Amino acid sequence: MNKALSKQKTNKLFYGKWPYKISTEIEGGHLIRRRGIDWIVNYDSAKTQVPAYYRKIDFTELRTFAKLLEPFLGDKVKIRVYTGGVDIYLQDKAVYEELQKLFYNCLVHTWPWAQSYKKNLH
């Protein structure tokens, strides 16, 4: 899925708080918003009745994505879900770098925080 990773530079905080952003593309990502990460992580196609239009989604890939993301969610990592993908907002550079490696196959854009902006925080 990783066509050509685009690394963008920014001097602003996303939503006034987040210095790092990772944009991903994942089929069925909208279900994270609609059903929740727990539902996706625990999804079992043999036991769960889903509408016909969900059947085209690769739940194995979506579940793997959700399982990798779930432990990071909290005060220092937030997500914004949209049709076709998930934007991940972060405060910690080490977590930013780790998530880039974990989600390499579905990355679309990354925004590393411009070093020149750090001096304006304090």
Image (cartoon, grey):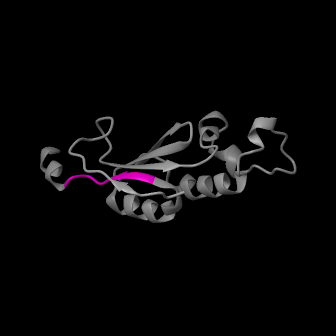
What residue appears at the point 64 percent right and 34 percent down from the top-left corner? 34
Q: In x, y percent, where is residue 114? A: 21, 52
Q: In x, y percent, where is residue 23? A: 44, 48
Q: In x, y percent, where is residue 116? A: 14, 52
Which residue in the rendered view is the most extreme toward the front?
3
Front residue (pair 105, 68) = 105
Residue 28 lies left or right of residue 56; in this view the side is left
Against 95, residue 40 (above or below) is above
Quadrant location, the C terminus: top left
Magenta stretch encompasses residue 84: no
Residue 79 lies left or right of residue 121; in this view the side is right
What residue appears at the point 32 percent right and 39 percent down from the top-left corner? 14
Count of all numbered marks drawn on residues in the image:
0
Front residue (pair 100, 69) = 100
Quadrant location, the N terminus: bottom right
What residue appears at the point 49 percent right and 50 percent down from the top-left corner? 24
Front residue (pair 70, 46) = 46
Give the residues in magenta.
108-114
What residue appears at the point 42 percent right and 45 percent down from the top-left corner? 75
Magenta stretch encompasses residue 112: yes
Residue 18 lies left or right of residue 118; in this view the side is right
